[in-house]
Image (spheres, helix red, strand yellow):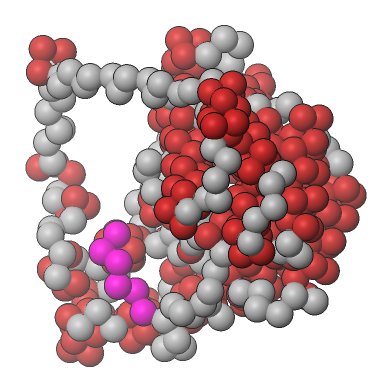
Amino acid sequence: MTEPSRPPELPTRLLTDPEMLDACRVRDFARVFRLIKIHAGIYPSVIARRCDLTPSRVGEVMAGRRQLVHIDVIERVADGLRIPGHMLGLARRSWETPVALATAERQPSAAQEPVLEAEPPAVLPGAEVESFLAQATRTSPSPSTLQALRASIEDYWRRDDQHGGEALRPAVVGQLRYVIDLLKETRSEPVQKELYAVAAELARLTGWTHFDARQYSQARSYFGEALQLAKQINDRQFMANVLACMSLQATYQDKPADALAYVSAAQDETHTTPGTTPRVRSMLAMREAFAQAALGNRTATHAAITEAHHQFERIQPGDADPPWVAYFDEPKLIVDTGIAHGRLGEAATAEPLIADALRRENSANQRGHAFHAFWLARTQLQQGKLDQACRTATQALDKASAVASQRVTGHLREFYDQLEPHRREPAAAVFEARLRELLTL
């Protein structure tokens, strides 16, 4: 399969136009995009596609409601629109070098390859250890104890992103039992409320580790426990969060009607809860988009995506967001938007969104990176970009193999099955060989 042709150069008269030079010098992309539209006939939808931006983002820039300041985005604009690097204060772009003069990048020999020491596995306590600790601790938890419990939850989630939750589960369950035992004693109302909140979060995390392992029955049990614990302190936002997890699980079980019912219930919880933040509402709207896409409801999916972006734009720095929704940042919003379009079969729309998010998301989240790379490969394959799809999937394999996540493994196996018509193609053979090295099919 041939590589896609490189974008055409901009007209010389535009690149030498004083207004264009000034707009590029100060990185006024509203003017840059307008000038390109007028003098090069490149419309916003094409600008978005060539620069791996969303059409709405390009529209906001042209309307002066948004600026492009991140260097990686500016580099994509330079490369996608063929604006010479010096005009935007960048280094000379690789495409500015004539092909005949370009030299291949030297690859290090095997002897030169750096040897990376493998990170030793974490030593985790068994569940019974935490139970014994619970028996020994019969005094009222101090503020530092409650803070330590919260910090441990944050650490569990971080490790879950990096390595998966299988190895963490004994420690998480043990700590859940520890907190449940603390709840059996009479304590002051603020302490008791905080303990219920911690227990609810630990139950949700335990359910999540089962969900990620595709152990759906156990996951539902722990999600149910998390709901009951949160209900004890009337934490309606957290209840909505648990219902959103259950909605996501239902999409994996091919139960889209259940998925929509769960997320609708979650949204009902927040509609009657004062103080629900825009970030929470945005996350729930995106969960609705997933459910609607699984049902094949195109119009409803697009409406939910629009609502998710509308709510995200309302986020203010001082918002009192619950800690559990902090993960839902702009890259997460963008990649979920791409996945929702991908679920509808809108691969051409999904691909640049997922690619943009992959470049921007936290590389420490190995599971998320592998999972999203699978989706990118899938959308590329749907468009007939076999070589590109196989390269994307092959690059994801190392991260996938480092994470104990049956969800990620399942997605990669599904991609492998989708390659069936292309088994004899060289790119597919390379992917299959690497996959067989890392995974047991």
In this view, 194 is above or below 388: below
Place of residue 405 in the rendered image (x, y in percent of width and height, measured from the top left)? 57, 27
Work out whether residue 414 can be spotted.
yes
Place of residue 333 in the rendered image (x, y in percent of width and height, measured from the top left)? 55, 60
Q: Nearer the viewer, residue 163 or 198?
A: 198
Q: Which residues are magenta?
A: 67-72
Place of residue 118 in the rendered image (x, y in percent of width and height, measured from the top left)? 28, 19
In this view, 77 is above or below 98: below
In this view, 9 is above or below 207: below
Query: Which residue lies at the image location 47% right of the left edge and 49% below the top edge?
Result: 145
Query: Which residue lies at the image location 14% right of the left edge and 70% below the top edge?
Result: 89
Q: Is residue 434 left or right of residue 109?
A: right
Q: Nearer the viewer, residue 323 or 13?
A: 323
Query: Which residue lies at the image location 36% right of the left edge and 79% below the top edge?
Result: 67
Is residue 68 inside the magenta stretch? yes
Q: Is residue 41 left or right of residue 305?
A: left
Q: Is residue 316 left or right of residue 241?
A: left
Work out whether residue 17 can be spotted.
no
Query: Which residue lies at the image location 88% right of the left edge and 55% below the top edge?
Result: 261
Place of residue 163 in the rendered image (x, y in percent of width and height, measured from the top left)? 46, 30
- Magenta stretch: dominant secondary structure: loop
Q: Nearer the viewer, residue 279 or 373?
A: 279
Is residue 338 inside the magenta stretch? no
Q: Quadrant of the C terminus?
A: top right
Residue 267 lies in what quarter of the image? bottom right
